[in-house]
Image (cartoon, grey):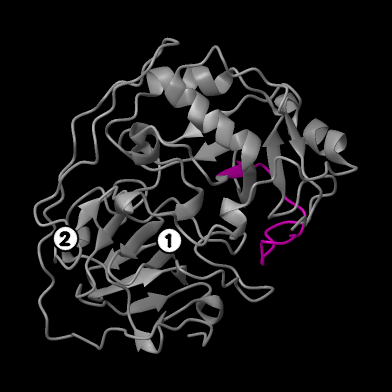
Amino acid sequence: MQARFCLDAWRRPRWARFCLSTGITVAVAVVLNGGCGGSDFPGSPTSPGGGSGSSSVVLNDDFGGRALFPPSNWWNQDISNAPVDANSAAFITFIGTGRTLHPDFGPPPYGIPYVSVSGNQALMPITFVSYGSESDSGFNGVAGYPIPGDAKTQTHFIEGDQAGGGTSGDRHMIVVDRDHFVLFELFGTRWNSSAGRWEAGSGAIFDLTKNDRRPDGWTSADAAGLAILPGLARYEEVASGRDITHAFRVTVRATNGYVWPASHRAGSTSGALPMGARLRLKSSKNLSGYAPDIQRIFRAMQVYGLIVADNGSDMYITGAMDTRWNNGVLNPAFSSLTASDFEVVQLGWK
């Protein structure tokens, strides 16, 4: 556990406390407006006892509209006037100028789920099976992650939407302690029933009120060493009608080293972008023909951009798993943009 995290008041071990049932509510799907007019979205889905201090688990929490990390954080950084990298055109050519964007999210099982819990959620020890030396065992000297007990037997907790995580895929698990505003993220998560323990490939914990970065060379629950949740396209933000004020997580098929704000490499392919590179939708791209909800997503790409966070499919934008997404609207909108509509911001720009 790193000493970089601290809070004035934090929990103490509660191993005797029973893990409370979740009370998750999955809202009915809402179709995104496919025309050019306005959209009428409902508010956040309601879970019984979902307020601060409650013991309930909330799926797809909007956190009262509160920003994840301070405004000065790299995820929330306005890059609309940042200089273009000298090799921008070559990087885009490597990806493929005609490569279209794709929303790597939607209704279950697509996208990465996340839940919030109260500050008294029981802490579960994690056995790290791959990157234990680069993982956080707990927060502020207290071991464990606040994993709801129902994650062992119910879906909607772990990427891939398999109860207990299953055995294949990235299986990211994201939990926010909403009372202390602390983010817990795991990669390769699974409940090992035979051993009676939670296992993960790696894990990272972030104080969402600070700009702490992983040590150079360290991974997180993501290959680049970055937090995942603040880079997700979240339905709650689109539905709220407010501007989206953060970058999005993007994958490319190959990477070459890393640059700030990333801390970890996952490849050395010549000509490829490094982890932590930022792509920005060109300001010349006319967004007026898109529905207002789609415009908000694409406008964020112009102002805050995309951050390369993992190897995967080229130009796949990561978002939260949510029953209310309509990929019949998202897919054609995203596929109308190609890599040539983007430019690469000067590598490592702060």
The answer to whether any part of residue 335 appears in the image is yes
Q: Give the amino acid at mark 1.
A: Gly
Residue tagged by mark 1? 188
Mark seen at residue 150: 2
Q: Looking at this view, is 11 or 123 the one in front?
A: 11
Residue 214 in percent (x, y) is at 60, 72
Please tell me whether mark 1 sits on a helix, a strand or a loop: loop
Neighbour class for label 1 at 10 Å: few (<14), some, many (≥20)?
Answer: many
Which residue is rendered at x = 77% and y = 57% of the image?
348
Q: Quadrant of residue 79?
A: top right
Residue bounds of the magenta highlight:
249-267
Asked if the stretch drawn in magenta spans residue 170, the answer is no
- Judge whether 175 appears above or below 214 on screen: above
Q: Earlier in the sequence, mark 2 or mark 1?
A: 2
Q: Looking at this view, is 329 or 223 the one in front?
A: 329
Residue 287 in percent (x, y) is at 59, 19
Mark seen at residue 318: none
- How far, Cα to Cα, is label 2 from label 1? 18 Å
Q: Give the amino acid at mark 2.
A: Asp
- Judge whether 295 appears above or below 188 on screen: above
